[in-house]
Amino acid sequence: MKKVLIGAYSQIPAGSPTPVLERALESVFKPMLTYLHSNNGAVLQLYLSSFLMEWLEKAHPEVNMLIGDLSRMGRVELLTGSYDQSVLSLLSPKDRSNQIELNTTWIRKRYGQRSKTLWCYAQYFNPIYINTLSICCIDRVMISTFDAICDEDYLQEPFQMHELGKSVQIVPTNSSVGSLVRQFASNEIGFSQFYSKLKTLIQECSSSFCAAMVNVDQLCQGGITPEQTEELFKLLCSFKPSSIEEIDDPNEPMKRGYLEAGWYGHDCLRSDLSCFNDLFVKDESLTYLYGRFTSMLDSARSYRKDKDVRKRLELLLQKMSQGGPYVCDANASMLRSSIRKLVWRYIHEADSVLFTAPDYTYPVSTDYDLDDLDEYLTIGKNISSVVDAKGGSLSELTYLPSLYNYGDTFAPLSGFGTSQSLHPPVGGTKQRIFTDVFFPRSLPIYEYDKRDKKNCLDMGRSTYELSVLDRRNTEYLAQATCEENSIMGSQLSVEKHFKFRQNTVLLEITLTNKGEEPIDFMYGCEMPLSVDSKKLPTSFFVMEDRKLIPYEEPEVTVKGVKSFKIFDEPNNTIITLVSDTRFTLLKEDYSIDYKTTLGEEELYQHTLYLLVWPLSLSPGEEQKHTLGLRLERK
């Protein structure tokens, strides 16, 4: 007799907007749980992210009570996982077990059930988990065995896996069911076709075991209605699903197998990544973010003094370990600025805790992005920043009263959504603040494109000679030389002097013609900023004759600018840029179009502000510009 398991899972990470949670609740969870409560014969496997469970407890306690009742009745079997939606392989063994124990304890206290089955966030599995699972008294791992990168499917029936003397049972979910849900999510098939194919698939499944786990987030992505959800689970419950404890046949020995490290299932976009960690080879921004996290781990755990400070740091380390920024799924976790900003908030709070801790010297120079060049962290009263030799620029710019990082300017790899931007950055490259670009005078500013190597010299990829000028780490000098090329017919020296004050970053730029020929082209200073905008397009205000002139276009070029302001309403912050010389300003919003659980969304990433001056220098002549970027409370 065929044994059938049915289940549902949602992987909504912390930082997701409330409408995402409401959509999953109203469209799927309420009709699903209500129907399950009225059907006495069905058992459902259920995985919920801790962020979703905590939100239900605060905003919809009646739903939490229903889950608790079903759990105590044995009608719902809850799966545990990493509490903060961490990718467990990115953590140390101690942190892995802590994440699992936190989630298991939360489930036991709220729902009265001790979960012994693990669900892997993003369905990434590694054999190194097995020793951790043994410590946490976890007996099973429920996961798809379909490797999308290799396009291979492993065993379809439960098997025992051994690693270093420890063992765990692997319960494979049906990959064909996962594929059908993905097709529904991407609107390749409608609900009626999805329903009929799913029914046929389970009925005609040749294996003696079928675990039909449906991704709730993908159901929402496909536009499922509450009525369709009830119809779907009425179908699944008609197969008389059993408890996970009943899948083993006591009269037959358990099959043995081995599930290698891999990224399984149909939940995530992978683009051209060869494995999960390939992300940290190809995407500079995410490599930098993960590097900030790992360096913070080392710094925080080297602090031994105050017990309360250590406890606070451990909580922040736990929260900043979430895997949402590294995964592109139905929730567009990688592309949602709010999810990344939450991780940055925890990092900057930990920075401040360590920096102000007595009798502790916080390291200010670290190679965060693993490019063999140290970055320099400077923390003041209201501003913290990271000065990078690459591009002679700023990798971070955080206003400490709000802990908001305006330097989190993300440009995803190709394949993760699409952009309608006219001047898109190169996918996977980190967009730093105050990088230098040069292009011919004959090129209109609105046609500027860093990807056009023939008509644009991008110094953001070049290494500057970086030196610290004072003991307090508040002044830095970045120097580079541009050799003669197709854009400039002579050698040019670029010198940038950064000065960090209480609320202001001052930048003195000196451009000197070191060659023997005159030069004549355009110089641009890029200032990409990620503003907390509730709507698109973002707006800014040019100051002219003591008046503020608003500009609300997604892309606009303004001539003769000397100062402009950006109002960050959600953070109650004003950003002001002032220059000692007038410049032409190109402003463009950069966003990614992606279909999420809320439908088609335009997900804001950052806004490019390009400050452009004409540069005409005789041999030995120099040109100077002074910029002041001020952040203050509104």
Image (tube, helix red, strand yellow):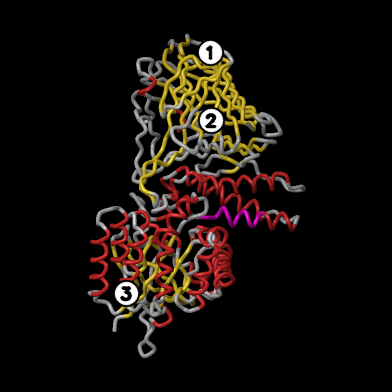
* Mark carried by residue 210: 3
Point out which mark residue 622 bears. 1
**In which quadrant will I find the N terminus?**
bottom left
Left or right side of 255 for 72 = right
Q: Choose top left, top right, bottom left or bottom right for residue 498.
A: top right
Question: x%, y% of residue 501?
Answer: 67, 29
Q: Which residues are magenta?
A: 313-322
- At 54% from the left edge and 34% from the top edge, which residue is drawn? 389
Left or right placement of residue 228 versus residue 468 in this view: left
Circles 3 and 2 in contact, beta carbons < 8 Å? no
Residue type, mark 3 in image: Cys
Q: Which residue is mark 2?
A: 392
Residue 587 on image: x %, y %: 45, 26
- The residue lying at 37 percent from left, 58 percent from top is 267
Q: Nearer the viewer, residue 282 or 143?
A: 143
Question: Does residue 327 sit above or below 192 in this rendering?
Answer: above
Q: Position of residue 372 (x, y in %)?
A: 52, 42
